[in-house]
Amino acid sequence: MLTLFMREVNFYKSDSGKSPVADYLDSLDGKHVQKIAWVLELIEDLPKVPKQYLKKLTNTKDIWEIRIVFSSHIFRLLGFFESSQNFIVTNGFTKKSQKTPLSEIKLAEERKRNFYQRKKQNE
């Protein structure tokens, strides 16, 4: 019997309901967005995602990095696992150096805190 593994990738929404990740993707070229969407589908569909696409960042509050390479462009999306079946993407950026900018990690951690505060208020 074939069982399908399904994980969901969702975009963080601010208090006002805006999605900073959707705004970031809207700023990119269509071909770049297609490649990013392909990697997001891999994350949703594969039980074990290769480290070249998804890895946990060390010295963070459980922040993960989605890595997308398209020709000479390197895109990164940061986020966290709300559960084993739900990954929340908090922010995205075009990477220009080897090291993930601390400001992007801090932004992901802040949005994660905000996500859980709002979730707790709505319980």
Image (spheres, rainbow, N blue to C red):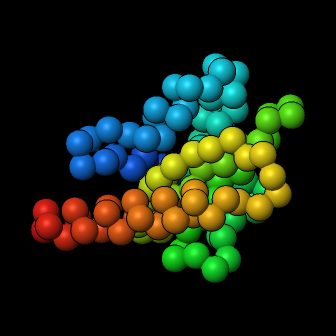
Q: Residue at x 19, y 70 (%)?
A: 120
Badge count: 0
Q: Could you tell me if residue 31 is visible in this image? A: yes
Q: Quadrant of the C terminus?
A: bottom left
Residue 68: x percent and y percent? 73, 44
Q: Residue at x 65, y 53 (%)?
A: 66
Q: Is residue 82 left or right of residue 65?
A: left
Q: Name, please, the residue furthest toward the bottom.
A: 59
Q: Could you tell me if residue 42 is visible in this image? A: no
Q: Name, please, the residue furthest toward the top.
A: 30
Q: Name, please, the residue furthest toward the right.
A: 72
Q: Quadrant of the N terminus?
A: bottom right
Tell which of 73 and 47 is nearer to you: 73
Q: Is residue 40 left or right of residue 85?
A: right
Q: Name, please, the residue furthest toward the front.
A: 103
Q: Is residue 96 above or below residue 121?
A: above
Residue 20: x percent and y percent? 43, 41
Name the image quarter holding residue 34: top right
Q: Is residue 45 above or below residue 34?
A: below
Name the image quarter holding residue 101: bottom right
Q: Residue at x 54, y 74 (%)?
A: 62
Residue 59: x percent and y percent? 64, 80
